[in-house]
Amino acid sequence: MVSALINVPKKAKRGEIIEIKTLMSHIMETGYRHTATGAIVPRDIITGFTCRYNGAEIFRADLFPAIAANPFITFFTVATESGKFDFEWIGDNGFSETASASIIVE
Amino acid sequence: MNFVRTIIIAALLTAADIVVSSLPATEIPPEQRRSGYSFMGPDTKAMQDDDTANPGMLWALDGENLWKSKTGATGKACADCHDDARASMKGVATRYPAFDKALGRPVNLEQRINLCRTRNQQATPLAYESRELLALTAFVAEQSRGLPISAGTDPQLEPFIARGRELFMQRQGQLNLACTNCHDDNWNKHLAGSAITQGHPTGYPIYRLEWQSLGSLQRRLRGCITGIRAQAFDFGAPELVELELYLMSRANGMRIETPAVRP
């Protein structure tokens, strides 16, 4: 199953501000909904997201039940050196997904 | 005397009112047709336009994997017969629902995929609205992105289009509304905060923000039918396929946007 869509520019100039876009496949079940018989649908959400740029953490987010399914997280950073972005999502029921993207900085 | 005259005028006015309301609904002239996309805000448009922001792409990419995976008693994948979908499935979605000779009636794209599974792969059909069926449908339909809809041109489909049109024009449910009352006659207005669109199925299966998921045209139609407080047809019902067929033929020439994003 395809779980993540990542959009990082392939190339950037040194010092340039770049936008990073991530989309993760997840139902984000709030834990506040009930079935027709009254039973609570257990919470199943992503609780945390981190992005590392060549090993150093540059962005972190905590996620909560009010966030819609398939969370789309975008942020900006400064392109300092060529290398790799590592993304990690963790959540309820042992959810853990990773993805990576590389960039060439000239 | 004045009293009698008032009664006569009132009666005439009532008669005129009945004549006006029983007039056939005005169909939208081809040059005024607009995709649901044009009714959306800039944020939702941006979401559809960027393939890495469009959650529908998660399903389309899943569909690409399913296309290549072997299944059923024959152990064949879609790709074993159809090769690269980018070539073989290009334009296919523009022609659906299409006439199936063996069944003697039109089938929609989901049903066609399931027929291929049961007839050729000897696999079990996928459930309506299951992730797998939506994914395969989205992947096949995505290959027609940007191509003009050309459904219902097969002469064998004429009686089915006519029945679909009849259902579109038929008032039903506790609110006593026909599809046409909103989608032909009032499409430039709002229902509560939401724009009433013209109801052209250009981007199905769509990622609907309200659903937080991908969904089929039949899901959308069932939602609308429930909204006018009528009894919705079951998934796969011939009536829904006929309505789909009428809607697609009504949108002929408009471009496929699958997977579209809608509020």
Image (cartoon, grey):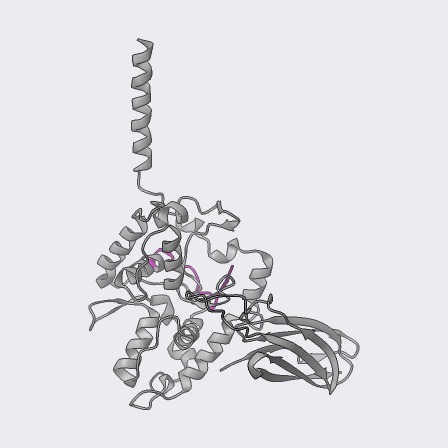
- Left or right relative to B257: residue A65: right
Q: Residue at x 78, y 79 (%)?
A: A14
**Range covered by the magenta-colored residues:** B249-263
Q: Is residue B195 visible?
A: yes
Residue B223 percent location from the top left of the image: 40, 58
Instruction: Determine which quarter of the picture holds residue A17.
Output: bottom right
Q: Is any atom of residue A8 visible in this view?
A: no
Q: Residue furthest top?
A: B1
Which residue sits at x=31%, y=55%?
A: B231
Residue positioned 36% across, 87% down in the render: B77
Report whether B202 appears left or right of B174: right
- The answer to if B79 sits in the magenta stretch is no
Position of the C terminus of chain A, as image quadrant, is bottom right
Q: Nearer the viewer, residue B23 or B230?
A: B230
Q: Quadrant of residue A11?
A: bottom right
Q: Residue at x 51, y 75 (%)?
A: B58
Image coords of residue B9 (percent x, y) = 32, 19
Decide which of B27, B219 is in the foreground and name it. B219
